[in-house]
Amino acid sequence: MIQETAYVALGSNLGDRAHNIYDGVRLLIERTGVRVRLSPLYETDPVGFADQPPFLNGVAELWGKLPEPRELLATCMRIEAELGRVRTVVDGPRTLDLDLLLCGDFVAADEHLTLPHPRMHTRAFVLRPLVDLAPEARHPVLRATASELLRALESADT
């Protein structure tokens, strides 16, 4: 167990999307004992594999005595599977997606875990709800806050 703050991206585009997300968060709380604060949920277009329904996306802030990052990721993956996620198509439709974005200043890059999340800084559907919760959350590799990353992404899109 570590005393940190972690951020988990939440997404769903199959079934009752909001229910799937809230069920996943409930299970995260039950399985880890952490406290959670949620961002608003946003409806977003799919990225990558475009022939699928729109997503609901948000971010959960977890704090308290967190499991080690690898165990937290494993817990997220077990919850996804328990709630019906089947991984058949990369970036394909899913009942629930729980992506570990940040865990304090922890940095890892191996076959099982990459932290911070390798694409979080390129995804407005992740950064916007992260900014809602923690605009000053700092990417430990890029050394930019969530607000700075979102502004850079939005200015690159214009």
Image (cartoon, grey):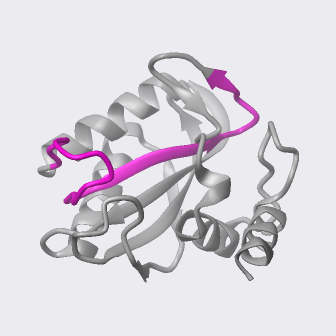
Closer-to-camera residue (66/117): 117
Work out which quarter of the rendered image holds the C terminus and state it: bottom right
Q: Residue at x 68, y 55 (%)?
A: 121
The span shown in magenta is 85-108
Q: Position of residue 126 (x, y in %)?
A: 56, 63
> Which residue is drawn at the image coordinates 61% and 21% (left, top)?
109
Query: Residue visible at 47% across and 69% down?
Result: 58
Decide: is 11 above or below 143.
below
- The image quadrant that residue 145 belongs to is bottom right
Please tell me which residue lies in front, 111 or 37. 111
Q: Is residue 131 above or below residue 29?
A: below
Question: Which one is in front, 4 or 8?
Answer: 8
Q: Would you say 47 lies left or right of 64 here?
A: left
Q: Position of residue 21 (x, y in %)?
A: 30, 65
Percent position of residue 83, x then y: 15, 51
Q: Quadrant of the N terminus?
A: top right
Q: Furthest-top residue in view? A: 110
| Residue 149 placement: quadrant | bottom right
At 62% from the left and 73% from the top, the residue drawn is 128
For residue 76, side relative to residue 154 (left or right):
left
